[in-house]
Structures are given as structure tokens and as C-alpha cells.
Image: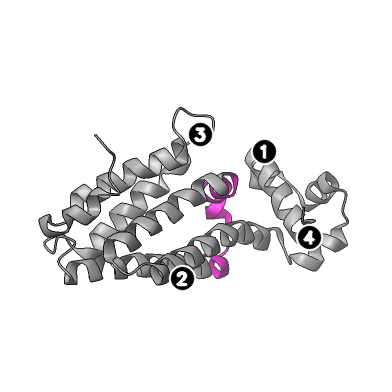
Amino acid sequence: MVKKTLKQRIVDASVVLFQQDGYHNVTVDRIVEYIGASKGGFYHNFKSKDELLYEIHDVFISYVIKQSQDAYDKYDTPITRLCAMLQTLTQVFDMYQAHITVFYEESRSLPEEYSEIIHKKRDQYRDILQKVIGEGQQTKDFRTELPCTIVTMAIVGMINWTYKWYKQTGPLTMEEITEVFTDMVLRAIVTEQAMEEAKQFMVKG
């Protein structure tokens, strides 16, 4: 098992503490005490608690961007690319659920310098997804009467809200939830000519 770096330990500890008591109620002293480190160790890795909150977001958004680009490069049709990207986006809510919850609940605390970086990274992810939707419309796999931007935002919005209600101990696994999301999206945007390819990714009746 790979030993975690101090930076990783600080991030993991802060996620637990922020989720438990709120960002504003947790001090740097408490974070380092929680993991048995020094304040010097903290400030060697982060210049402030704000930068730490930004890092919590960067961990999962960077993962989503990389995996989405990998999915785009690996597959060669709009439908297979879209399905792989949907799986990537939902997986992050399982893998980084605590990070995402903390970030969404506390993101208003971030100063503008970090907010701008975050918006750019989110735009980067949406651009990859929107590119797939747009290419699918060009190949007539996806319905052209639906605005590409709105389709993209609808997909992101639907899945982003997962953090509010998904529980790892719930009746459905994230894989099963992903199948539902994928089915809903495909049935909404796929054309008749592409339905045969899409059916393999739909919930079996």
C-alpha cells in the first residue's frame, strides 16, 4: 500500500473536519493536530486554508477532466464517448463524495482568485462534453433540434445534484444509478437512426 504524502493527509483530514463542523469552525491548528503534524508542515503545502479548500475541489475536477478526455480518446462514436463520460462523471460522486459535499457546501468562502480557476476547469470539462454532443448532432446520432449547450448543461446539472441525495449505503449502487442516468439521457437525445447502437447502453426491460 502506497503511503500517503503529508499533503494528501491534510486534504483527507480537512474533508472529514469540514464536513463534520463546517469550514469556518475548523482551524489550521485543529487540522494538524488531527493528523499529528506541524503548522510548518501545513504551510509548506498550503499557503492558506482557502488554498486547501481549493485543493479539495481540484482533486475531483482534475480527475473528471482527465478521465473524460481519456474516454473521448479511447472511443470513436458520439454514443460510446458520451456513455463513457457519463460513467466518469457519476463515478466521481462515489469516489470523492465527501470532497464534493464539502466543496459545494463551502465554496462561497473561496476568494475570487480561486473561484476563477475553478470556473475555468469546469468550463474545460463542459467543453469536452459539449464537443461530444455537438459531434453527435453533426453525425445525426443526436437530435439536432435540441440546443447543444442546453443538453450539455442539463446533463451536468442532473448528475451534479447527486451529491445531495446519493448514499453509498443506499438501495442502488452508483453503477446502477449510472445506468438509469445513461438510459434517460440517451432516450432523450438519440435519433431513430442511432437507436440500435444506443440500446446496448440502456436499461434492459
Q: Residues within 10 Å of mark 1 (few under 14, many from 20)?
A: few
Q: Residues within 10 Å of mark 2 (few under 14, many from 20)?
A: few
The reply to whether the C-beta atoms of the residues labelled 4 and 3 are less than 8 Å apart is no
Q: Secondary structure at mark 2?
A: helix
- Please provide percent x and percent y for residue 167: 51, 34
Q: Secondary structure at mark 4?
A: loop
Looking at the image, residue 49 lies above or below residue 120: above
User: Which one is closest to the eye, mark 2 or mark 3?
Assistant: 3
What residue is pinned by disc 3?
167
- Please provide percent x and percent y for residue 8: 73, 57
- Residue 106 magenta: yes
User: Which one is closest to the eye, mark 4 or mark 1?
Assistant: 4
CA gap, disc 4 to disc 1?
24 Å
CA gap, disc 4 to disc 3?
28 Å
Mark 3: amino acid: Lys
Mark 2: amino acid: Lys
Mark 4: amino acid: Thr
What residue is pinned by disc 1?
21
Query: For the point 12% across and 59% down, which residue is it?
Result: 193
- Residue 72's disc is none
- Residue 5's disc is 4
- Please provide percent x and percent y for residue 133: 26, 65
- Please provide percent x and percent y for residue 173: 47, 36
Q: Earlier in the sequence, mark 4 or mark 2?
A: 4
